[in-house]
Image: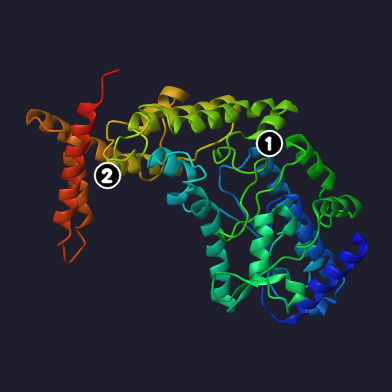
């Protein structure tokens, strides 16, 4: 079958499935070649239908982890603006309130900097990939669930292809429902949700041929996309909209999070720098530093959060150094890498973990030479600092660690609203045992 014949068949499938019922469609758009091809195919297919038949809601959904490659973010934002304009004015001009373009972001407690610098999570790797669910799956699924709650069900349209990898092909074959559009639809793990992969059987070469030969429907320039891939590397793959654990995340050379340490080297960013994007160098240097820091001596606590004799989160001095480096990147590049609410949340997390001696505002001033008022939490932070100063004075007079006392107070505060507080004694005992074990381990370590 020729590419033209395949495109004709895909277009017919899209139209048939669209007209089948009133189920709203959510089209995942990551800015990469596959999601671009799918969105373009859907637009062209719908534009050929009579206006009176275009009645179901169409949602174009993009996900921003807030640590995406800045060059890619700028490109995607430009495309989303064009997509919304053309979608409402050209395709859904009769029902503009049925066409939506949305970019979702993680909840603040799930964001990368809160977990890395605030909680001290080590940089993700193949065995501890804490980022995907928090930053990719959850935001997308929240949007899907809200759509289901309004309409009863939904269809998620993705640019997934069997040619992406052998593992992905096996996963798709496992869940195929052969009676519907040649097996291109499968059940989503979420209730009343389905997934549709129109270009499932296209090869990578066929996707590129289609994008080059057929004009971009919303007025974008697919040649720019070709150039972005070429500059990143010939084998660069996209990070798709990830909606469950079976959806492929990112390949070894890909557009995605610039802080990603799941791979040993970020070849795409290296190649972008080699091709003239010199301003990315501080980002690459930080990523490489982060990759090495996970196993660096003295970087992490000797016990984990459960009090077990296993390596734990980053030490507070490590978290503070990470923040210094991130703020320095902002000075060097002019980018806003970390937001004010995230800075406030990091300070709150440090206080919760007992790192009261480390202040985000002090580090900010050291790097930027100016003071910062982070958010409305500033008054709360100031009050906590004043309380800690008083606690420190009293604790020193009695020969105890103020951080330990503060953590016990925080534990007590957590149970204030509980009618039954029987578990508080167990939690306080665990904290005390944690302090004792940590002190014992630190005493055994040689002084460097």
The answer to which quarter of the image holds residue 34 is bottom right
Front residue (pair 356, 288): 288
Q: Secondary structure at mark 1?
A: helix
* In the image, residue 34 above or below residue 377: below
* Residue appearing at x 67%, y 65% in the figure: 172
Q: Earlier in the sequence, mark 2 or mark 1?
A: 1
Q: Quadrant of residue 168?
A: bottom right
Measured Cα–Cα span from mark 2 to mark 1? 38 Å
Outermost left residue: 398
Q: Front-most of 159 and 312?
A: 312
Can residue 332 be seen by looking at this rendering?
yes
Q: Position of residue 183 (x, y in %)?
A: 73, 72
5 vs 81, left or right, is right
Query: Residue at left 40%, top 36%?
Result: 373
Q: Which residue is mark 1?
A: 268
Q: Which quadrant would the C terminus be assigned to in this image?
A: top left
Above or below residue 390? Residue 247 is below
Query: For the residue carrying disc 2, how many other residues have a C-alpha within 10 Å: few (<14), some (14-19), or many (20+)?
Result: few
Q: Which residue is mark 2?
A: 308
Image colouring: rainbow
Determine whether the residue tagged by mark 2 lies in a helix, strand or loop: loop
| Quadrant in which the N terminus is drawn | bottom right
Which residue is at a point 22% across and 47% down the rendered structure image?
410
Residue drawn at the location 22% of the way across and 27% of the way down: 444
Judge left or right: residue 260 versus residue 415. right
Give residue 260's position: percent from left, percent from top.
56, 40
């Amino acid at each position: 079958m020729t590419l033209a014949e395949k495109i004709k068949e895909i277009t017919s499938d899209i139209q048939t499935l669209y007209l089948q019922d009133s189920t709203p469609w959510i089209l995942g758009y990551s800015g990469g070649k596959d999601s671009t091809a799918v969105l373009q195919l859907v637009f062209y297919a719908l534009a050929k239908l009579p206006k009176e038949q275009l009645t179901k809601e169409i949602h174009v959904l993009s996900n921003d982890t807030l640590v995406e490659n800045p060059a890619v973010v700028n490109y995607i934002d430009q495309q989303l603006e064009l997509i919304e304009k053309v979608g409402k004015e050209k395709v859904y001009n009769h029902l503009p309130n049925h066409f939506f373009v949305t970019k979702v972001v993680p909840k603040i407690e799930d964001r990368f900097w809160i977990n890395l610098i605030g909680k001290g999570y080590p940089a993700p790797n193949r065995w501890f990939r804490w980022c995907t669910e928090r930053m990719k799956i959850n935001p997308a699924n929240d949007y899907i669930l809200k759509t289901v709650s309004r309409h009863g069900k939904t269809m998620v349209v993705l640019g997934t292809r069997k040619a992406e990898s052998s593992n992905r092909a096996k996963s798709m074959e496992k869940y195929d429902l052969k009676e519907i559009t040649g097996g291109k639809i499968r059940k989503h793990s979420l209730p009343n949700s389905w997934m549709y992969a129109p270009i499932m059987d296209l090869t990578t070469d066929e996707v590129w041929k289609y994008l080059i030969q057929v004009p971009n429907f919303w007025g974008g320039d697919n040649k720019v996309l070709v150039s972005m891939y070429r500059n990143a590397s010939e084998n660069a793959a996209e990070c798709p909209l990830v909606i469950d654990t079976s959806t492929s995340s990112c390949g070894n050379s890909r557009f995605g999070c610039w802080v990603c340490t799941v791979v040993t080297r970020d070849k795409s960013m290296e190649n972008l720098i080699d091709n003239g994007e010199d301003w990315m160098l501080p980002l690459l240097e930080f990523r490489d530093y982060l990759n090495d820091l996970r196993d660096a001596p003295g970087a992490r606590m000797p016990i984990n959060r459960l009090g077990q004799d296993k390596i734990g989160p980053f030490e507070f001095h490590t978290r503070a150094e990470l923040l210094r480096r991130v703020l320095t990147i902002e000075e060097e590049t002019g980018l806003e890498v970390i937001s004010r609410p995230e800075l406030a949340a990091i300070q709150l997390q440090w206080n919760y973990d007992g790192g009261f001696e480390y202040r985000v505002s002090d580090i900010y001033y050291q790097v930027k030479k100016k003071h910062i008022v982070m958010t409305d939490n500033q008054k709360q932070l100031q009050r906590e600092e004043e309380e800690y100063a008083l606690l420190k004075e009293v604790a020193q007079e009695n020969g105890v660690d103020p951080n330990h006392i503060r953590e016990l107070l925080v534990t007590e505060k957590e149970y204030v609203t509980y009618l039954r507080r029987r578990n508080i004694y167990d939690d306080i005992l665990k904290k005390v045992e944690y302090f004792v074990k940590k002190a014992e381990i630190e005493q055994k370590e040689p002084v460097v």
